[in-house]
Image (cartoon, helix red, strand yellow):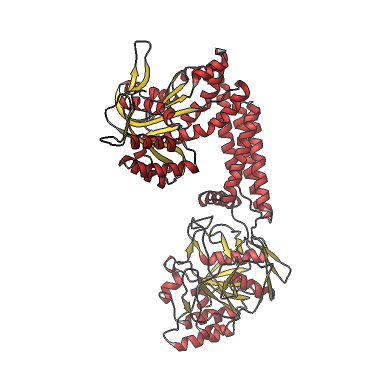
Amino acid sequence: MKKLYFFIISIMISVLIVFLYLLNPIILDSLNKKITDTFFYLKGNEPTSNLVTIVDIDEKSLSKFGQWPWERKIIAKIVKNLTKASVGIIGYDIFFPEHDRNKKNDYIFAKSLQNSPSILGLMFYFDKNITKNTLPNIPAIFIQRNFEKEFLPEAQGYLANIPGLQKSVYSSGFVNMVPDNDGIVRYVPLIIKYNDNFYPSLAFEMYRLSQGISKITINYTPVGIDNIHLDNNQTIKTDRFGRVFINYRGKRGKFNYISALDVYNNTFNKNLVKNKFVIIGTTSAGLFDLRATPYESVFPGVEIQATLLDNLLKNDILSKPENKEIINIAIILIVTILSAFIIYRFSAIKAITAIIILIALIYYGEYYLFRKHLIVLNTFYPLFSIVITSFVLTTINYFFEYKNSLLIKNAFAKKVSPNVMEELLQNPTDILAPKEKEITIYFSDIRSFTTISETLKDPKKVIEMLNEYFTPMANLIIKHEGTIDKFIGDAIMAYWNAPKNVLNHEDKAVSCAIKQIKFLKKINKKIYETFKVNIDIGIGINTGIATIGEMGSKGRADYTIIGDSVNLASRLEGLNKFYHSHIIISEFTKKKLKKDYTIRELDTVYVKGKNEPITIYEVIDFGKKDFNEYNKALYLYKNAKFKEAKKIFEKLYKHNKDYIYMLYIKRCEEYIKNPPKTFNGIYKFTTK
């Protein structure tokens, strides 16, 4: 039995974890990313290609030339000195969307750009359609293969450079970086789409031009982009949106930095730029180009551009395998089953040790793939699966080990309802003290039980048949948060909202009654096969104030309820025989129902022992249904218009041989034959 439980529960946990993995809620996805971030810490610093240098608009340069933007002739001199030093390609992580105050400086800067291998930067907007200047034409061919639905980021607006400068350079690339929900930049798009045109990132465009690549193929699958293929036979693995997972080299400062002031003064090391890629950007906090990365929360945006370019040059971008879902799900299933086996087979100490080792192996294995093969798998869900499986099955194991003691405890607990037991344990004095409280009371009774007993003859069979009936009925009451007071022969007495408060207790009592009537068909099938009898029941429900508490003699006390509201519920149950109904509720219960039910008014009556009339209702099923014609006839009857009422009741009976229609037909005929002197529409019962 224990083995079966472990197997079933481990399968259920596997399904749950796989479902969560496929759903991938933001909070769990963030936890997985945090775990992957730890791989960068373990990896530490690693060498760059030494082909990328950053010209830094740093605090020293700003102190000399003043706040940004500078006069264009200053930047022109920086570009001129870089060009003289035989720079390979210059990329600009800065923009020039406005003219210089002195337009002559724009001309000087444009001339320096014309004589240099420059690629300007530009910015796209995704939340506003603002446009500034004109976007450049990218000298490359972009092809979308197996394209069905667009997955590339699509911009709404842009910020480009002034035309005079744009025309002076080879090309341009965007510098957008979209951080994850936790603010960390892990992925960078390689291509952005605007008005059906394709635009590469600054780093990607610098790499493309350096390699002489003219054709870029974006390969799609039904669920998104799989990779970007270049005509130098290089394939770049991306996520479904065409973004690449940046393989950071370490903390800031991994690339060669040259102050913009030193380049301006031509006092820099020329070997740092000769035939190399140079990106001009800033590390100054005042220019707000600082981002968060897995290594640290303050990281220059220009160094992220440099890292992406270095990744392309070394062809070591991190990636997820094409069939990552299958691999991740397989790992989840394997570790769940393995965890279940460990908990089942080993003692507590050995199991804990084995689970810790399993967690370490999963973490190290995925780190190894990350470090050595640049493969990123989901680490959180396998670890989460191990922890959840271990916790749940260890808890179950605990219950199995203490099964004997729990069985003894449960034997005593069965003498009262679980709710009573819980309240007694928490505050026995308060729960036992008599008090008045609004509750919903329930009575049910088997019709013609004497006849059934006579048919069965054997008292043992009578008890067996009753147990077959009582068990599912009691379970339904408990399932609907009811408390079983007692079994009285063939009757059940129960109530809601005591000893514990039960929200919407009226609805729960009525819902329970409907389900009992429905379930009776299934019970009868089994009872008839065994005992050759059928059971029919009536249920009465009333809501009102009752006295609750422990009552009885010393040593023979019981937690129960008393009061007029209890007596009324009992009377309502008995009225089912008269109206040929199954469930009757009082007007007090009906007023407080919140759900929709198929309910019709039966009568307004004086019940035995009550001086005030009450309106009673028959509950037929769930769902709202109108009884317009019936209600009209009932209205006429209550207003002593017996002939008109009789016609409608006869019409209704013709289409549906419902006993209630015949009952009112007979009443109307009697009153037509013997007209009453006064008539208030209230029927008086003289028996229970």
Q: How many numbered marks have been drawn onto this rendered protein structure?
A: 0
Q: Is residue 250 above or below residue 195?
A: above
Query: With 105 as the anchor, is 221 left or right in this view?
Result: right
Q: Residue at x 69, y 76 (%)?
A: 214
**Which image quadrant for residue 117?**
bottom right
- Residue 95 screen position, x and y as percent: 49, 76
Position of the N terminus, as image quadrant, is top right
Please name whichever residue, 305 or 391, is drawn nearer the observer in this view of the structure: 391
Q: Can residue 114 be seen in this view?
A: yes
Q: Is residue 431 above or below residue 31?
A: above
Q: Residue at x 41, y 46 (%)?
A: 629
- Residue 205 screen position, x and y as percent: 62, 73
Q: Can residue 442 be seen in this view?
A: no
Position of the C terminus, as image quadrant, is top left
**Which image quadrant for residue 52?**
bottom right
Please name whichever residue, 173 or 102, is drawn nearer the observer in this view of the structure: 173
Q: In this view, does 209 lie above or below 304?
A: below
Q: In this view, does 577 lie above or below 366?
A: above
Q: Residue at x 63, y 53 (%)?
A: 376
